[in-house]
Image (tube, coloured by chain):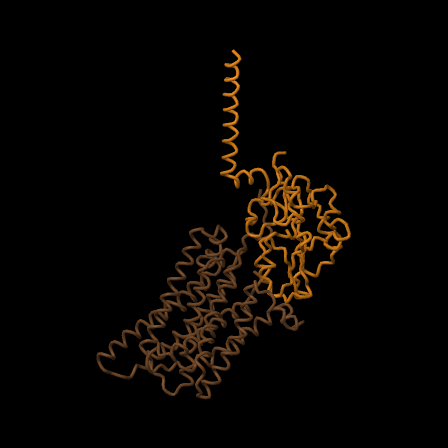
Chain colours: A orange, B brown
Amino acid sequence: MKKLKGVKISRRRVLKVGALTTVALTSGLLPGRLLKAATVEDTPENPNQMGFMYDQQLCIGCGSCGDACSKANDWEEGTKWRRILQVKGEYVYLSISCNHCEKPACLEVCPVKAYTKREKDGIVVHDPTKCVGCKYCMYACPYHAPQFSEATGRINKCHFCYERQDKGETPACVASCPTKALSYGNLADLRKTFGGVNQLPGLPDPELTKPSWVIIPKVLGE
Amino acid sequence: MHWHWLIVIYLFLGGLGAGAYLTSFAAEKGWLGPSSSLKRAGYYLAAPIVAIGTLLLVFDLGQGLYKPWLLIGLLSNLSSVMTWGVYILSFFIIIGLIKGFLVFKNKNAPAVLTWAGAILALATGAYTGILLAVVEAVPFWNTAIMPVLFVVSALSTGLSATALLALLIEKQVSQQVREGQAHLLLIVAELVIAALFFGLMFTGIKGTVGIESAAIVVSGAYSVVFWGYFIGLGLLFPLIVFILQQRSFKQTAKKTVSEPSVISSRLHIFADISVLLGGLALRGLIVFAALPVWDGFTLFL
């Protein structure tokens, strides 16, 4: 009896181990698929990369993020560092600025090196005093973050309020959001958010520049 | 659309100057026939034309006239194709000027200089296409065909511009069979590459935005410019003229008549001007039909 029982258990074990091995092997064979299913993207190259997170379900489209940004950063005439977009005929929004991409196309094409990506937090900063106004970055950025001011003849864009962040303060847009739809943080942590994505329908393929943002899309009917 | 006419003309003139240099280079090497009259005109055209184009680019820059000292920064980012372009154009203008001056003075230029100029000319022509081709966020530009199309158009327009100037400055202009053949070859090549390019776009290989861009050009807002100026005036009309010219070459050879008719040489001038218009139209179409991968406004569910 004892022996028989033992055999039974070991069979079960064999089955269990077998099943587990199969799962492990499959996940090993298809790591990309599993990762994509579970999180936004693989972990960022720079573990200190900061990013925005935007919850489409919480946003009421009030525009206070844009207003706060404009006030805090004194937008040059004709530039919009943060834009609030709306799905036609729906109460569905997107608050978008610069995504401080892991592979910033602006930085790559800029002939005068006006763009720098900070090592400490991955923020992409544009120095308007170096900018010659060639507008090459406006073509390169799929998110239209670099904005040209006809008045000053140069590019301006969101710098994630890096000076505030250096002082331990919150970026102006995030601080102003009444519903906490807009937040920010360490990108690796943000990407663990359940339901978070890095692309919305019709928006650019994230493989182009690897944007440092996480969006929680609105599920209609809720 | 962020770039306008100044950039279109700059891209056109960059190609034109490069093509002009290469035309006279080819003539000097004897590739365009034993007594080609194109050995000097292209060298005269090259550097000034590229310099004028570069000047237009400076006018287009937001800071070009406002804080011109910032332009020195254009040499700093070696990963930017635009920076490559600044180096290539600068060296080409310098070498082109020296070569042009030596040719004008009837002095022999060192072979190294002439060859360096030819390589820089090719680089200039290719650069104008690569500048656009590397922009991934503009599907219409983002193909390896773009630089090839621009180089062929550069050679074609350069050859025509050189032929036109040669008529003005050379005492004896004898049309060479090889020149006509070069014209023909370039126009046929450009037709094939353009067909390939638009065919590729319409397959959807560069996404729906690529198809949209191509559709604007072929059947949309720019279709008149495309069919009228680029295909009609720029390629088909000169194609017919140069085919007729080749046939008349054969006939004159048979009849042993040495004088080409006045009408045919006038037609030749029109064909060359026509090629230039087509080249300008091509740059305009490519720049103006550049739709971004996302328009920056439209949000879907």
Q: Give the quadrant of residue A188.
A: top right
Q: Give the residue at x 59% y 47%.
A: B299
Residue B87 in the image: state x and y as whole percent: 55, 71
Front residue of B245 and B179: B179
Q: Quadrant of the C terminus of chain A?
A: top right
Q: Is residue B132 above or below residue B166?
A: above
Q: Give the quadrant of residue B73.
A: bottom right
Front residue of B169 and B219: B169
Q: Is residue B147 above or below residue A174?
A: below
Front residue of A203 and A64: A203
Q: Give the residue at x 56% y 72%.
A: B56
**Residue with the most extreme top position:** A1
Residue B122 in the image: state x and y as whole percent: 45, 70
Q: Is residue A182 above or below residue B44?
A: above
Q: Give the residue at x 71% y 46%.
A: A62
Residue A78 placement, left or right of B236: right
Q: How many marks?
A: 0
Residue B170 placement, left or right of B130: left
**Residue with the most extreme left position:** B254
Residue B162 in the image: state x and y as whole percent: 42, 78
Front residue of A121 and A105: A121
Q: Give the quadrant of residue A196.
A: top right
Residue B74 in the image: state x and y as whole percent: 60, 68
